[in-house]
Image (tube, rainbow, N blue to C red):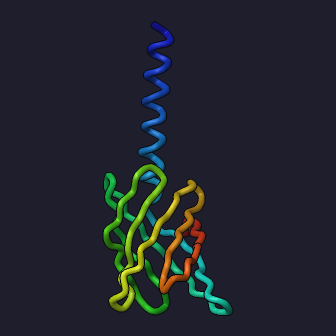
Amino acid sequence: MKRKISIITLLVSCLTICLAASADLNGKWKGILKFGDMELPLTYTFQVDGESLTGVVTSDQGDLPISDGKIKGSDFTFSLDIGGNVMPQTGKFYGDSTIITSEFNGQKTHLKLTRAQ
C-alpha cells in the first residue's frame, strides 16, 4: 500500500513539475541576436495558456507578434512574420534560460535568452 501511494505521489509531482515548467516561460526574456559584427537586442514576452503560446518580440525597430505558438513540456515552437517572410522558430526552456533556434534564408541562428529583471 505504501508503495502504491509513493508511486502516485511521484507521478503527481512529475506532472506538477512539467506544468510548472510550461508556466515558467511566461513573462519577459532578453537576449542579443548577433549577425557578424551587428548586435540586435531583443525582448521576448511569452504568454502560455495550456499548450498555446502567444506574445511579442520587441526590438529597436518595433514589435513582432508571435503566431502559431505551441508548447509541450519544455519544447516550444512559433513563427514570426518579418516583412511578409514567415520565420519558424523552435525553442527549449531550461528554467533559468531559453534557447531559440531560427532559420532565415538558409541560415540558422541560435539565441540565448535570460529572464528580464
Measuring 57% from the left and 87% from the top, which residue is drawn there?
40
Q: Quadrant of the C terminus?
A: bottom right
Residue 97 percent coordinates (x, y): 59, 61
Measuring 55% from the left and 69% from the top, which residue is drawn there?
116
Q: Return the residue found at the far right.
A: 37
Is 50 situated left or right of 21 in this image?
left
Which residue is at the front of the view, 19 or 102?
A: 102
In this view, 31 is above or below 23:
below
Residue 77 percent coordinates (x, y): 41, 64
Badge count? 0
Is 115 situated left or right of 81 in this image?
right
Residue 75 percent coordinates (x, y): 47, 56
Q: Return the residue found at the far top.
A: 1
Residue 10 percent coordinates (x, y): 49, 26
In this view, 7 is above or below 115:
above
Q: Quadrant of the N terminus?
A: top left
Measuring 44% from the left and 64% from the top, which residue is drawn there?
27
Measuring 58% from the left and 81% from the top, which residue is drawn there?
33
In this view, 97 is above or below 12:
below
